[in-house]
């Protein structure tokens, strides 16, 4: 089957969805599919500084076409970029016909897939990921209409978890039966515990190493984590852990400023951008993993931490509760509750049997349930169900353009 995969952002962008796309494409090629990827990218200084950027690299076995998001970079003109994506897909179809269009994200890529499907009479499916369910469509009338078009008329909707599907239902009224739940996955052959691993062991018991890896974004709870560190230093200075923050993002500067304001310069280190090939070694630097996120579609970093053998402290929120259960394979606190986060970190750092039990359980589960070959076969099965079907064209793309915070700061979408 010849599949056109339309990606919102791909490497070198710092995003869990880049990781997701890379692994899915690799597995599709392994399953014998012919894949063309059309990927947007940021080429401007702001987009590159916040998320990483530049044209997508070569992907073995995949035809890769990079499209600089010129509209997004110039006043948040997503409509211009959608038109470019559609034109590119149509031209590629003429060169070598597609059997299926698969878009990553409902907007803008999902809408582009629907428009191209209408023109080419091809089936399509859309993966609802990241901000699609959390805030896109709740921001302005234009994006609301666009998301409703995708949610109501895509041939299939893939989503990473039931809690995320329920959030989209709450925000947009989408019936739960519209979604096919396919969880996130991890390269279990790449992400392994460090050499000599003993579940729950601390390499330096008097100074445990907490690890935050991912996008440095207040929506991921990184500023809450710094506040929790300040509480620990104030209340329990004798057992103060150190914190490694790995990654870049829209709040990198704010996080560094908060670190200085809280007098945490001796306790927090920022390691910056981490190439995906080096990320397994990043996890090996930590004794436990912290993800105080406000919402996820399905967290790649949590799966990577599970596979790396780390005990995890996270939040009881959308996209997390589907893979972590409090006191069974992780510790969960309410999102935004800095005091609860500090207490959970203190507990995890000082309770060896708890760390051992949680890390072992999480490691076992990720091996059994979240390996990429298993998840890719599920997605390929959806392709087979849709193959040869006609797209739903009963929708109108003439949306009025209205003011929106994502037009003012489009890099946040």
Image (tube, grey):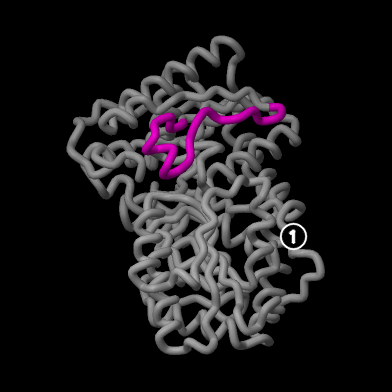
| Element at label 1 | loop
Image location (x, y in percent) of residue 95: 58, 10
Q: Which residue is mark 1?
A: 192
Image location (x, y in percent) of residue 107: 38, 38
The magenta stretch is 41-61
Which residue shows up at 29% across the image and 28% down it? 74
Is 54 magenta? The answer is: yes
394 up-or-down from 178: above or below: above
Q: Nearer the viewer, residue 127 or 71?
A: 71
**Left or right placement of residue 165 versus residue 328 in this view:** left
Q: Which corner quadrant holds the C terminus?
A: top left
Which residue shows up at 73% across the image and 61% down it? 367
Which residue shows up at 50% across the image and 72% down it? 267
Q: Nearer the viewer, residue 69 or 322?
A: 69
Q: Quadrant of residue 369?
A: bottom right
Q: Nearer the viewer, residue 352 or 46?
A: 46
**Left or right placement of residue 242 versus residue 62 in this view:** left
């Amino acid at each position: 089957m010849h599949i056109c995969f339309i990606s919102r952002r791909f490497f070198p962008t710092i995003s869990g969805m880049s990781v997701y796309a890379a692994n899915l494409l690799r597995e599709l090629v392994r399953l014998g599919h012919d894949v063309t990827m059309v990927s947007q990218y940021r080429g401007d200084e702001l987009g590159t500084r916040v998320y990483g950027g530049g044209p997508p690299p070569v992907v073995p076995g995949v035809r890769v076409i990079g499209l600089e998001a010129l509209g997004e970079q110039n006043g948040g003109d997503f409509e211009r970029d959608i038109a470019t994506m559609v034109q590119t897909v149509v031209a590629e179809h003429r060169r070598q016909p597609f059997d299926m269009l698969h878009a990553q994200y409902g907007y803008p890529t999902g809408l582009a897939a629907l428009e191209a499907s209408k023109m080419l009479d091809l089936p399509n499916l859309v993966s609802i990921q990241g901000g699609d369910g959390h805030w896109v469509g709740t921001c302005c009338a234009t994006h609301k209409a666009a998301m409703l078009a995708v949610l109501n008329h895509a041939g299939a909707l893939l989503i990473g978890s039931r809690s995320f599907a329920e959030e989209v239902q709450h925000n947009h009224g989408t019936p739960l039966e519209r979604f096919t739940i396919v969880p996130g996955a991890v390269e279990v052959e790449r992400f392994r515990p460090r050499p000599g691993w003993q579940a729950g062991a601390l390499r330096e018991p008097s100074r445990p190493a907490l690890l935050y890896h991912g996008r440095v974004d207040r929506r991921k709870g990184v500023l809450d984590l710094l506040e929790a560190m300040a509480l620990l230093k104030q209340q329990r200075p004798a057992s103060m852990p150190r914190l490694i923050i790995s990654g870049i993002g829209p709040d990198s500067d704010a996080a560094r400023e908060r670190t200085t304001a809280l007098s945490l310069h001796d306790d927090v280190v920022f390691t910056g951008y981490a190439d995906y090939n080096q990320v397994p070694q990043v996890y090996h630097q930590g004794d436990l993993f912290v993800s105080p996120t406000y919402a996820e579609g399905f967290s790649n970093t949590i799966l990577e931490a599970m596979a790396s053998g780390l005990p995890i402290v996270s939040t009881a929120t959308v996209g997390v509760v589907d893979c972590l259960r409090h006191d069974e394979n992780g510790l969960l606190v309410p999102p935004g509750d800095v005091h609860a986060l500090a207490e959970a970190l203190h507990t995890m750092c000082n309770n060896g049997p708890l760390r051992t039990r949680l890390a072992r359980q999480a490691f076992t589960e990720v091996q059994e349930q979240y390996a990429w070959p298993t998840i890719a076969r599920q997605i390929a099965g959806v392709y087979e169900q849709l193959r040869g079907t006609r797209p739903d064209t009963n929708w109108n793309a003439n949306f009025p353009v209205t003011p929106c915070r994502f037009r003012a700061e489009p890099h946040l979408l």
